[in-house]
C-alpha cells in the first residue's frame, strides 16, 4: 500500500467554500471541466452526454438542499463538493500501486495515471465520494487543484488559482495556504468558524466550508444594504474578468 508523506507538507494548499453566498450556478463545475479536459488529468470524458442518462467525469459537483430552520423559515443551500485533499487521505493509503499520492511540497493529492490500474479501491475508501472513474481510460481521476495552472509561470500571478475559483461570479470560493495562520484563507476560516466536512471520519480535510449565516428578517435589511452588497459583488466580478 502507499504511504503518506513522512513529514507534514510544507504548505497546505486548499479551498475555502462559503455556503452562505454560493448560488449553485455550476460555473465552478463547468470551468473546471473546461480547464482540466486539457490539463493534468485530461481528458474528462463524457458518456452519452445528450441521452436521457448522461454520465462522465466531473471533478466538481454541486448538490442543492432545502433547509428549514427552527422558526420554520426555509432556504436553499447549494453545496459544492470535490476532493478535499485530506491530511490523512485514505484514498492514498489504500492504493496498491502508488498511483494515488500526496505531495510533500504542498499537500495536494494526485493520481499517477501511468500507475493506476482502475481497481477503484480509492473510490471505496474515500468517504466523500470525490473519486471519478474514467471508463474510457480505465483509471481513477480527481480534482488536482489545477496544479498545472497554479504553478504556471506563463500566467499573471493573480490568475494562478484553480479554475473553479477564478470563475465564481460571487466570490464563494477562496484558495490559498491553509497551513499558514497568516494567510487570507486561514484568517477567513478563523473569522467565520470554518469547519471540516464529516470530521468524524478523521480524514482531516484541507478544504474548509463556511456555514450559511442566519437569515435576516426582511424588516432588518434596507435597500441601501442590498444595493451595497450587489455593488460589491459586481465590482469583484469586473475585477476578476479584467484580470483574466
Image (cartoon, grey):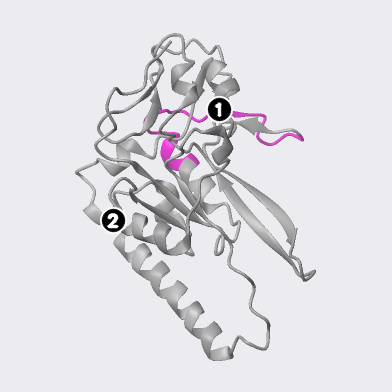
Q: Which residue is mark 1?
A: 126
Q: Are the residues flagged by discs 1 and 2 in contact, CB closer than 8 Å? A: no
Q: Residue 180: percent from the left, percent from the top?
A: 27, 49
Residue 201 position, x and y percent, is: 56, 33
| Disc assigned to residue 4 | none
Above/below status of 160 relative to 88:
below
Specify whether residue 50 is painted magenta: yes
| Percent x, y of residue 19 | 56, 58
* Residue 11 location, quadrant: top left
181 sits to left or right of 68: left
Q: Residue at x 77, y 71 (%)?
A: 71
Q: Is residue 19 left or right of residue 86?
A: right
Query: Between residues 184 and 52, which one lies in front from this camera angle?
Result: 184
Closest to the observer: 112 or 2? Answer: 2
Which residue does the numbered mark 2 point to in the structure image?
A: 183
Residue 136 is a magenta residue:
no
Q: Using the image, determine if residue 187 lies above or below residue 204.
A: below
Task: State the residue in front, 213 or 162.
Answer: 213
Residues in magenta? 33-52
Amino acid at each position: 500500500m502507499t504511504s503518506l508523506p513522512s513529514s507534514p507538507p510544507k504548505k497546505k494548499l486548499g479551498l475555502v467554500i462559503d455556503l452562505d453566498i454560493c448560488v449553485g450556478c455550476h460555473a465552478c463545475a463547468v470551468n473546471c471541466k473546461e480547464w482540466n479536459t486539457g490539463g493534468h488529468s485530461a481528458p474528462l470524458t463524457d458518456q452519452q452526454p445528450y441521452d436521457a442518462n448522461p454520465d462522465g467525469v466531473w471533478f466538481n459537483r454541486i448538490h442543492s438542499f432545502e433547509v428549514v430552520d427552527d422558526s420554520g423559515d426555509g432556504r436553499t443551500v447549494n453545496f459544492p463538493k470535490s476532493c478535499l485533499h485530506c491530511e490523512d487521505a485514505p484514498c492514498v493509503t489504500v492504493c496498491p500501486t502508488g498511483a494515488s499520492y500526496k505531495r510533500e511540497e504542498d499537500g495536494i493529492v494526485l493520481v499517477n495515471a501511468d500507475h493506476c490500474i482502475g481497481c477503484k479501491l480509492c473510490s471505496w475508501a474515500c468517504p466523500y465520494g470525490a473519486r471519478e472513474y474514467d471508463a474510457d481510460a480505465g483509471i481513477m481521476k480527481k480534482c488536482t487543484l489545477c496544479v498545472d495552472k497554479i504553478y504556471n509561470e506563463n500566467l499573471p500571478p493573480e490568475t494562478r488559482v484553480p479554475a473553479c475559483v477564478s470563475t465564481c461570479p460571487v466570490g464563494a470560493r477562496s484558495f490559498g495556504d491553509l497551513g499558514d495562520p497568516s494567510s487570507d484563507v486561514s484568517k477567513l476560516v478563523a473569522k467565520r468558524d470554518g469547519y471540516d466536512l464529516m470530521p468524524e471520519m478523521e480524514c482531516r480535510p484541507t478544504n474548509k466550508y463556511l456555514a450559511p449565516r442566519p437569515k435576516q428578517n426582511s424588516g432588518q435589511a434596507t435597500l441601501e444594504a442590498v444595493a451595497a452588497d450587489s455593488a460589491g459583488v459586481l465590482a469583484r466580478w469586473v475585477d476578476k474578468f479584467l484580470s483574466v
